[in-house]
Image (cartoon, helix red, strand yellow):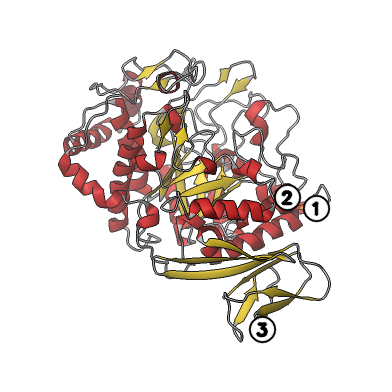
Amino acid sequence: MKLFAIPLALACIFAAASVPAADAALKPHSSHAPFVWQNATIYFLLTDRFYNGNPANDLAYGRRADAAPLRGFMGGDLAGITAKIKAGYFKDLGVDVIWLTPPVEQIHGSTDEGTGNSYGFHGYWARDWTRVDANLGTEDDMREFVDTAHAHGIRVLLDVVMNHMGPVTAVDPVWPDNWVRTGPPCTYKDIASTVDCTLVKNLPDLLTGSNENVALPPALIEKWKSEGRYEREMKELDEFFIRTAWPRAPRYYLMKWHADWVKKFGVDGFRADTVKHVEPAVWKELKQVASAAYEEWKSRNPKKKLGDEPFFMTAEAYGYGIADGLQYRMDGGARINFYDHGFDSLINFGFKSDANKAYEALFSDYSAKLNGPLKAYSVLNYISSHDDGGPFDQLRQRPLEAATKLLLSPGAAQIYYGDETARVLLVPGAEGDATLRSVMNWEELKVNTMRNGYSITEIRRHWSKLGLFRHAHPAVGAGVHQKLADQPYTFKRTYEAHGISDKVVVALDVPSSGNVPVSVAGVFADGQKVKDYYSGTSTIVVNGKAKFPSKNAVILIGQE
């Protein structure tokens, strides 16, 4: 694959901004707990499915309510997320980061590929990367969302798509063939048949490997002129290409447009979609452009930034598991180190099956890998997601165990919206991944619905206690794990890096009678006061043990 070289002067500018997040000095925000990405609790939501903050924007661009079950717009928007931040919903869960699906303007029409009409409610069918989709709100809504998140100590992770744009419809024309390919379909036999192809029928694939100078698509020019911003957009593009000396190739337009979301609003990182379908070097270039934009935003907004860590990127390299270490196995058997191509983290598709292991087998294995081959980086664990048809505990029969394993495992944790409220993942009438994307079950939380023997409130309370403990203690996800005792099962985590020192002890499967002595020797000294974050009670360490009333099966010990 041919990729245009970065000019030396630009490379020098980017060098400081592209250091892996794990290697940079981290300064706790003055009013919030110490933050490290390796311990982040990331709340992933589909904006349209989360909460409707402004019913006036429910159907924009002439869209209609004629979609197949769960394949149309349902009303959620940026104002809705902002409202829930202000209400303390995320803070109560210990959430450090909100990851939202792409807010860019989607195709206006719908498709019908055998499942009924489908719209771009999910954000992965771009029509214009430079505009907020009107169904989700305005630029002012986006700015208020990010500013509100930052004011509450929460970072923002933006989903970005470099591989494809939206399907062609009666009102969404195909872009020129020097911008996209419309075939052949991917066969996944080797790298070429994974990258130089279309994921599915009628999903135009962007020519990210091209170095050809291309003009803007006529449809985009016409759109910008009708919106009265053509001159402004062209001026910014001209300045970008003069500054970088890059050709006006498709991928560089996309990099500029994606980085503008960082420059304008201060988003703190990207989650990159369909990573293996794009030339690997493209991601490193995107990281450099976004990093420069992030440093510019921070310099202009010193009171809004949450810290001095560099721009962060995590990747969806489909099928990657923590067992793969640094080498992702591409189709055809080739190996690629995506960590060496701009990513600080990879989404861990293996966790959903690894979560079936016993606690110690899971925790010790993950700690060994993250403090060994992956020490400079991290993984993002999850139990359910928007396009994974085989989640852990799909029927929500083990919601407390799911929370315990996800939030106490080494690595960063992704809560998919509704994990914490046992939102149903099997919806009658919905086909394929649509069943994973139901509307957030606010009403069930309000009336405290029962789910498989647990109340929704009880489930969320358990997620909250674990999340708040994790938020307060970087050692939980980023520390070194060591078992301390078998009965009850007890372990410690210790973290020493970047000026942060933290240690915790956790006991699980605690018996429910009497005061239970938990081994803390070597972690907390005799006479030291420690707190159980699960019950909220405190005690003094005596003879290497901390005793707490054992009303709960979980004890989470740390200093306040």
Task: Report if the CB atoms under discs 1 and 2 are less than 8 Å apart.
Answer: yes
Residue 83 visible, this orientation: no
Q: From the viewer's perspective, is 500 left or right of 444?
A: left
Amino acid type, residue under disc 2 in the picture = Pro
Q: Position of residue 383 (x, y in %)?
A: 63, 44
Q: Quadrant of residue 259?
A: top left
Mark 2 against mark 3, which lies toward the viewer? Answer: 3
Label 2, label 3: how many angstroms apart (C-alpha)? 36 Å
Q: From the viewer's perspective, is 74 left or right of 335?
A: right
Query: Disc 1 designates what residue?
Result: 454
Query: Disc 3 designates what residue?
Result: 543
Mark 3 secondary-structure assignment: loop
Query: Disc 2 designates what residue?
Result: 399
Return the residue found at the far top.
184
Label 1, label 3: how many angstroms apart (C-alpha)? 38 Å
Closer to us: 402 or 126: 402
